[in-house]
Image (cartoon, helix red, strand yellow):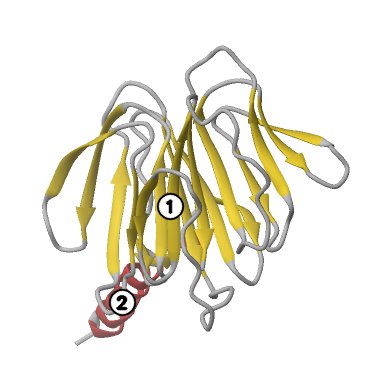
Amino acid sequence: MKNKPILIATAILFCSSGLMAQVQVSKEPLHKKVLENKYVRLMNVWLQPGDTTMFHIHSTPSVFLHFSNTNMCSQAEGQDWVNDKAIPGTAWYRSFSPDISVHRVTNCGTVPLHVTDAEILSSFDSTFKKAPLDFPLLFENEKVFAYRLAKKSLATGIIKNRGPMIAELVAGDKVYYVDAGTGKKTQIKSGGYLYIEPGAVFSLSFEGNEEVNMVVFEIK
């Protein structure tokens, strides 16, 4: 059969394309890596209306946070599209063990979709069990504490002897990380994040006029 080699080559190419279409989330082009160390890999995701990610694989324990208010749609591999709603400040955790996820996401709304995905790569101190900080606790699991800080949390006091943290400001103005040793202030801007080294001695200062919506993830 003269066309047999062509058919075989086409089949190989098709299979290869299918495999290439599935990448680890950290390799998906619209998941921009903005931080990576031994504890965490943070990816910043912006999808303009109509944008769709590649099919990608989640297989590492992760925490997620929505920053925008828009409609979104997702499709698990081999399944139908599902409509969902992104709500600013919504945070959640998924272990992806043993239930890895292969899916793609599209912004089916009319404004940009902004979400972060933080993969937890390593525990900080799994032998010593810490109590959570005296902040409103969103959730806690074997990997992380998640806190919500609002404007009424104007004075955090000095924080020390804690694990690595990611402070993410969904909304608010004039929010600062304050180094307790030097007094130096580092502003955390709305829609942005700040990585806080383990063992840092600091406070958080809320000096603006806008309502604050901040989520802080602390790795155990």
The residue most toward the top is 209
Is 84 left, or right, of 134 in this rendering? left
Task: Determine if residue 27 is in view.
Answer: no
Q: At x 84% / y 37%, what residue is drawn?
A: 183
Q: Nearer the viewer, residue 196 or 4?
A: 196
| Amino acid at the residue labelled 1 | Ala
| Residue 37 drawn at (x, y percent) | 66, 66
Q: Nearer the viewer, residue 197 or 86?
A: 197
Total marks drawn?
2
Q: Residues within 10 Å of mark 1 (few under 14, many from 20)?
A: many
- Please say if 98 is above or below 220: below
- Please say if 88 is above or below 77: above
- What's the CA distance linking mark 1 and mark 2? 20 Å
Name the residue beneath numbered marker 1.
146
Is 14 left, or right, of 123 in this rendering? left
| Residue 212 drawn at (x, y percent) | 49, 25
Q: At x 55% / y 75%, what residue is drawn?
A: 122
- Please say if 164 is above or below 48: below
- Please say if 32 is above or below 149: below
Q: Nearer the viewer, residue 117 or 126?
A: 126
Q: Quadrant of residue 175?
A: top right
Name the residue beneath numbered marker 2.
97
